[in-house]
Structure formats: C-alpha cells, structure tokens
Amino acid sequence: MAGLDREITLRFLAEPTDVNFGGKVHGGAVMKWIDLAAYACAAGWSGKYCITAYAGGIRFVRPILVGNMVEVCAKVIYTGRTSMHIGLEVKACDPKFCQRETTTHCIVIMVAVDEDGQPTPVPEWVPVTQRDIELRDSAMKLMEMRKKIGAEMEAHIHP
C-alpha cells in the first residue's frame, strides 16, 4: 500500500563482472545499483511506476572490491507533488567480517508517472523525527542549489 514504506535496503555480493580496469567495482555498476534501489524505494512509497529525473551529489568515498557484501539503503527524504527525493547510502564489507563502511552516497529524484508517462501525484511524506526534519530541510536547500547550477549549465548546453 502506497505511503507506508519509505525505506528499502538491497543486499548482494559484488561480482567479477562488476570490476573495472583498476580491479575495483566500476562506478557505473554502483550507479546502477543506486538507481535500482531508488526505483524500488520510490515505487514502494508511491505505489506507481517511477522514472529517474535527477541523480546528483554522488560521492565515491571508498572502493568496493569484488566479493564484498554490498548494501544499498534508500529512503524518502522529501516529497513534492509528483516527485520523491531519495537519499541513498552504499556500504560494503568483506562478508567474513562484515564491518560495513560507507562507500558512496547521493540523492536521486524520482517522478511517479501514469500509464501515459505523465507525472502523477504521490503520497506526501511528513517528517516526524528531528533527523527526518533535517533531511527534508537539506533536500529543500539542495533543490535551490540545483536551480542555480541548472542555470549555469545552460551555458554549456547552448553555447
């Protein structure tokens, strides 16, 4: 039922097919996992098909090794009328010891769409805890920053 589950965690082992030329898990593989978790979280919250509208602020903190246990945690941190801001944190560890350490974090904005691909309303998420209020406020500040960055990027898109 929509509007009940705001968090999801995906867990799996990093496979040899995920490796880059440096012997670590490829950043593109990590970004794919982030997108999958963001979708699962957004679809679970909205009860609708969702598309990725934005992925930003991605920080690769430390590498993931092949064979590591990987955990991708996603949670709704802000809702608009049709969009959901999803905060994501990727952690990894050697499965023999499993002291998970953050490897990557970012925010993804997902938009719920109807059968015609048009944006459709999502349930509102209302923060309750102080931490949730801080996350919501941070998401709102980032929205303002993205507007400024978008305006600056226009110069690169349309010279």
Image: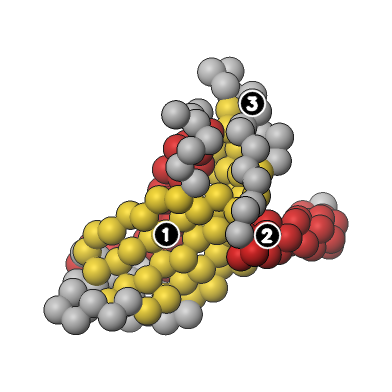
**Rendered residue at 58%/18% (across/down):** 116
Q: Does dot 1 land on a helix, a strand or a loop? A: strand
Query: Which sits earlier in the primary sequence, circle 1 or circle 2?
Result: 1
Q: Which residue carries the number 3 mark?
A: 120
Left or right: 74 with respect to 119?
left
Q: Up-down: is 128 above or below 24?
A: above
Three-letter code, disc 3: Thr
Q: Quadrant of the C terminus?
A: bottom right
Q: Which residue carries the number 1 mark?
A: 73
Q: Which residue carries the number 2 mark?
A: 133
Left or right: 100 with respect to 133?
left
Q: Quadrant of the N terminus?
A: top left
In the image shown, does 26 or 12 lie closer to the viewer? 12
Q: Point out the frontmost of discs 1 and 2.
A: 2
Q: Up-down: is 147 above or below 83?
A: below
Residue 10, picture quadrant? bottom left
Three-letter code, disc 2: Ile
Mark 1: few, some, or many residues within 10 Å (few <14, many ≥20)? many
**Rendered residue at 62%/53% (across/down):** 128
